[in-house]
Amino acid sequence: MKRRLLILAEGKFSPLKSKTANGAIVYLRDEVAAVIDSTKAGMTAQDVLGYGGDIPVVKDLQEGLAHKPTHLLIGIAPTGGRLPVEWRQVICRALEHGLHVLSGLHTILSEDPEFAGLAQKHGATITDYRKIPPESEVVSKGSWRTRKAKTILTVGSDCNIGKMTTILQVHRELVSRGVKADFVATGQTGMMIRGRGIAVDSIISDYIAGCIEREIDQSESEGYEFILVEGQGALTHMGYSGVTLGLLHGTMPDAMILCHQPTRLKDDYGLPIPPLDKLILLHEDLVRFFKETKVLGIGLNSVGLTDQESAEAAARIERETGLPAVDTIRFGAGKLVDAILEYSAVPVRR
Amino acid sequence: MKRRLLILAEGKFSPLKSKTANGAIVYLRDEVAAVIDSTKAGMTAQDVLGYGGDIPVVKDLQEGLAHKPTHLLIGIAPTGGRLPVEWRQVICRALEHGLHVLSGLHTILSEDPEFAGLAQKHGATITDYRKIPPESEVVSKGSWRTRKAKTILTVGSDCNIGKMTTILQVHRELVSRGVKADFVATGQTGMMIRGRGIAVDSIISDYIAGCIEREIDQSESEGYEFILVEGQGALTHMGYSGVTLGLLHGTMPDAMILCHQPTRLKDDYGLPIPPLDKLILLHEDLVRFFKETKVLGIGLNSVGLTDQESAEAAARIERETGLPAVDTIRFGAGKLVDAILEYSAVPVRR
């Protein structure tokens, strides 16, 4: 039976606050039945996000059940990743109706006695994408030194800025051009889409690089020529920079795409977003201690801008950085993929 | 009753392979009863390490018991931190003799049914310094923005190169000059010495910065004026760089001491140690996205060199970097503390 996802995003459904919900709406659109958010009930996903078509927003679980869901998907990934207390009752009721629960929260729902008991009683399953998998105590071996596949990583000028979206758009475009390309998911939303991956922010810090390396090794062993790795966090975000550097060195990317939102001036600490030229150098320098690499382009998140404003911002950034820049959701990832293929045709200096 | 530590370092007791043992021998010397390593039995710590005086090396647990230990201290912290299988029997026998066990391994000994059962039966305790403490799911708040105390962090050109030793020597020297200085332990050996701290490499990666910030906040709340944070890993060590950057941004140090071993040319992957000038810039740049900072000096690990060779290496590095350089174990941390106090007298630009 096909999954039908009811997404819980109560009070949070919006372009920026419901990252997991929004990723599911873009990349699992055929599976999404409805979104719960009483503050936007009666609207569609399109109304709220500017994409997602006629997926309805409903006021509560009861109304959502009318759309015959099979799964409740927790649609947020808040700072720190804990379960909002007020969502507990909704999850309990969903389990009582036999809905399977998909969660990317740090709070491991399947280990909660009340949730686990209800799931067992009603024949439902609970999937925690951030549960640390067994055998995740692996230290990086440095397999990039003998890797044949090209690895591309998205990095960002901030957290929650479009790194998953951009790499998925690049992946889609590469595949459409007949390239054997894989997508390596590193966060809960990406894992829901790909069906596998590793939530790097849940790994014990000694093993970040080792765990992502193992995912890439697996993709390579399956014959993929391009391995597109979803970035996490930002090197200049003081809360999560450790995750980002572990991911950068675990990937040792042949090339990077820098994701950026032209209208975002400050991060969630109120600290200014650094200039793009400095960020490009920083990311390249940190890999060049090991191997040659290059930031090949800028993936824009132009939420709140018109198409014309987005194109103007891209043109300005192209002049400033000398790199192709584009909002891949609006205009496709063609420009970025052109740059990737052109760069990759040249033998990469190790 | 005073602790008497029997250190288990079978087959590993040496200047570089038994980091935890060696830290205990330097900083808990009065508590160390003996070291177990059959390959060096009959020697003293001084013979093996060049320090540690007449602490005896014994061939097995049985011989160690003659020195009336109260605790068995696991004296290694291997890559990945797992328990060597051949040590299991020794730990079991020690517990049967009622010895308390102190461990900094990633393998949590107190959760092992056999160890836990023996401990309970024989009235022994098991302390796992790397066990993730409850309530360690904290995201960095950025409390450096209002911090009054000066924070100093050791960083390194590689892992296992002297970051704990150097910061402890600096701490000792600052205290001897009447400065109210605290030592914040971030690894298992430091925690054994300080009696508190956080093993950052055991923290879930999203919380590295938050956990270290909380330790610093606690020291500041106790009135310390200088907070000396033990560094971990290296930004240019591909296995553990994520830990290092999380620690760097969790600390947001006012100043850093770069630790280096002049005779070490390659890391444990066989990759070259980068030039010091590049490392200094990299560390400063990564903090300067947020605040002013400076690498103030170089702490040398001159194992294998004579005193004269060590001094010559220091002089060469001083010429190359323009910074004071010294092996603080051999020659004291006076030079580095002079630089710290001189720098700190100038109001720090935020």
Image (spheres, coloured by chain):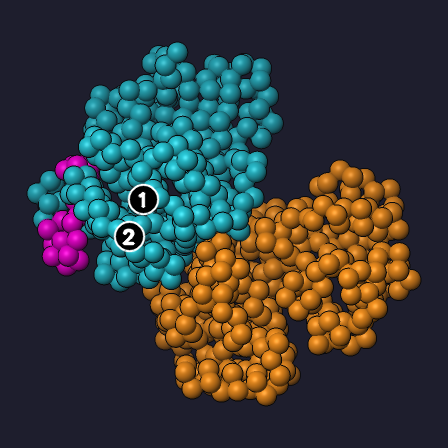
Chain colours: A orange, B cyan
Image location (x, y in percent) of residue B88: 49, 28
The C terminus of chain A: image quadrant: bottom left
Parent chain of label 1: B
Residue A196 showing in the rendered view:
no
Q: Chain of mark 2?
A: B
Residue name at image x 34 percent, y 49 percent:
B253
Label of residue B150 in the image? 1
Residue shown at 42% from the left, 20% from the top? B71
Secondary structure mostly taken by the magenta-highlighted segment of the chain: helix
Residue B5 visible (yes or no): yes
Residue denoted by label 2:
B348
**Three-letter code, disc 1:** Lys
Q: Is residue B99 magenta?
A: no
Range of magenta residues: B313-332
Decide if residue A49 is on the left or right side of residue A252: right
Q: Earlier in the sequence, mark 1 or mark 2?
A: 1
Mark 1 and mark 2 residues within 8 Å of each other at the beta carbon: yes
Characterize the local packing of mark 2: few (<14), some (14-19) or many (20 or more) Cα atoms within 10 angstroms.
few
Circle 1 or circle 2, nearest the eye: 2
